Amino acid sequence: MTGTLLPEMLFFDGPFPRISRRLRLGIVGGGRISGMQATAARLTDRWDVVAGALSSDPGQAKARGAERYLPQDRCYASFEEMAIAEAARPDGVDAVMITTPNHLHHAAAKAFLNAGIDVLCDKPLTNEMSEAKELVLLAGETGRVFGVSYTMSCFPMIRQAREIVADGQIGRINQIHVEFMQDWMIPDSVADAPHVKWRLDPSKSGRTSCTGDIGTHAAHLASFVSGLAMTHLRAEMHVCGAPKPLEDTVFMMTRYEGDVPGTLMATRLAPGNRGGLRLRVFGSEGGLEWDLEKSEVLKFNRFGEADRIISRGHGHGVSARTERLVQTARGFPEGIIEAWANLYTEFALAVAARRDGLSVPDDWLGMPRVADGARGVRFIEATVRSHNGGGAWVAV
């Protein structure tokens, strides 16, 4: 085994390279999403899940760790204990995923960064902008990799859409529309489910529920594909279903760099929509449309020409940069687990490059970083400010 993780000859335009060993990954948070992420990380063949803080109750922490085949001595009852213990081990974790409720993201990320451990954190990054800024600064000071799980940007067709826009193939962007429609919060009883209660608790979820959870995905995706930062918004937050302490729906008008207008809508009360994330970017020469529920295809139109449907798959007309994110051969479907795996692949390569002391091109890895997470928090705060101001236009 070599002393470095990445190959000596590294080609940034080709397929992603293998690394000399699997990296060691720790889990903070024992909910459903952590299991999904662990599965995706293993799918990359670049991570072994070796430690976790899955409950604040010591007994539960060990029991849940046993269910995930973790060594008992590496099942911790707090992330503080885990950060200290793992940093002291010669075989300690190389990185950690943070999948706790929102209010714990800041403290957990801070503990691991200070321990010298790379971090991949769920969104929203924090509940307060001051905390987000602190994490951006701390990531810079420690030099650690800090990814944020805006996983929708890791679908191959989203990367293809981003390239098409960057290449100028739809011309000058003139409008951006994005929506995230779900239906799982329609039953009144759903608020009693353990994984839902904290999402409606302002002390844990922050000042928003729907906006911070899925609205931020929509906002990030719009800017990620268009390459334009959102500059202003005008928002209204609603409780459309049973009474709740936080909103289940948000509608807004948006503006991006260059005074490009758009719309953003998110709700959990849209019957028939399970993963209704839809993005439409229109320009002076053409447009792009993508739907999460049909995530393997991208509609690409140039005005006056026949519509094109680009589909995910090796050797099927996608770019080389997109193709390296394709997990399976043409004809075999892929979905959210593979998108998570793409995020963990890029995270692994970023960690490996950092550990090898290697500088890599800024555009080699498209994974969202801590600065993207901070922009998401700024978006949430602007939404609340606009709503509280009667739907006034505010700067993001």
Image (cartoon, rainbow, N blue to C red):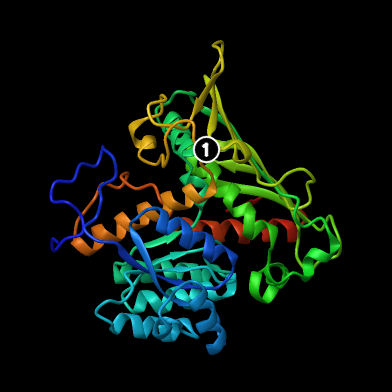
Q: Which residue lies furthest to the bottom in this view?
A: 58
Dot 1: within a 10 Å radius of its alpha carbon, few (fewer than 14), some, or many (20 or more) residues?
Answer: few
Front residue of this view, candidates 90 and 279: 90
Residue 392 is at least partly visible in this image: no
Instruction: Please say if 252 is above or below 376.
Output: above
Residue at x 56%, y 63% (from the top left corner) = 33
Q: Which residue is drawn at 13% across and 60% down?
A: 2
Q: Quadrant of residue 207?
A: bottom right
Q: In this view, does 224 lie above or below 304?
A: below
The residue under label 1 is which amino acid type? Answer: Pro
Horizontally, residue 388 falls left or right of residue 232, namely right
Residue at left 49%, top 57%?
Answer: 149
Query: In the rendered view, does 79 fall on the left or right side of 299?
Result: left
- Percent of width and height locating residue 258: 52, 36
Residue drawn at (77%, 57%) of the image: 185
Depth order, front residue of 334/222: 334
Residue 297 seen from this side: yes
* Along the line of sight, the residue nearer the viewer: 310 or 43: 43
What residue is pinned by disc 1? 333
Residue 314 percent across, percent down from the top left: 39, 31
Quadrant in the rendering for residue 317:
top left
Relative height, residue 62 to residue 152 (above, below):
below
Residue 49 lies, in percent from the top left, at: 40, 68
Q: In this view, does 371 lie to the left or right of 186?
A: left
At which x and y percent is residue 140?
A: 33, 66
Secondary structure state at the residue bearing disc 1: loop
Q: How many marks?
A: 1
Quadrant for the N terminus in the image: bottom left
